[in-house]
Image (cartoon, rainbow, N blue to C red):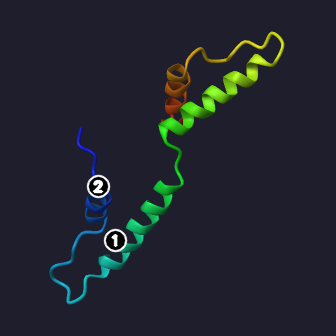
Amino acid sequence: MNKETIEEASLRLYPIDLEGAWDFNKQYRDEWIEGAKWQAERMYSEEDLRKAFRHSRQALIFEKDMPPVYESFEEWFEQFKKKQSGE
């Protein structure tokens, strides 16, 4: 599955108006692109989540008889993705 670039998505959402004297969608495309880039900069990477998972597991070691809820990062991450997608 090919991932769509931000620019490709903006053109799909706000197509170029070839008939009009001014492409009114250009402003919307530009603003949408800036918003998408802003949001991407604030998202956690999978590596960030792996680090957080490791730190939480280490914290559990210090608790008495506190078993981990998830045995592995992969198990937790799959559950997290399912919750995010609404499954």
Q: What residue type is labelled 1?
A: Arg
Mark positioned earlier in the residue sequence (2 or 1): 2
The residue lying furthest to the bottom in this view is: 21
Residue on which disc 1 sits: 29
Identify whether 18 is placed above or below 53.
Answer: below
Q: In this view, does 56 lie to the left or right of 39?
A: right
Measuring 56% from the left and 35% from the top, which residue is drawn there? 49
User: Relative to residue 24, is residue 11 depicted above or below?
Assistant: above
- Compare residues 87 and 52 and report the one nearer the observer: 52
In the image, residue 35 lies at what x, y percent? 46, 65
Q: From the viewer's perspective, is 85 left or right of 24?
A: right
Residue 72, position in %: x, y? 55, 17
Residue 85 x %, y %: 48, 37
Q: Please state the total of marks drawn on the protein image.
A: 2
- Report crowding for label 1: few under 14, some 14 to 19, many 20 or more residues within 10 A (C-alpha): many
Residue 14: assigned label: none
- The residue nearer to you, when weighing 87 against 66, is 66
Pick the front one: 22 or 77: 77
Name the residue rendered at 30%, 77% in the picture.
26
Quadrant position of the N terminus in the picture? top left
Q: Quadrant of residue 32?
A: bottom left
Extreme residue toward the top, this view: 65
Mark 2 lies on residue: 5
Alpha carbon distance from label 2 to label 1: 13 Å
Q: Residue at coordinates 52% horizontally, 49% vertically from top-left?
A: 43
Would you identify the image quadrant in which residue 64 lies?
top right
Element under label 1? helix
Left or right, 55 with respect to 46, comes to: right
Circle 2: element type: loop
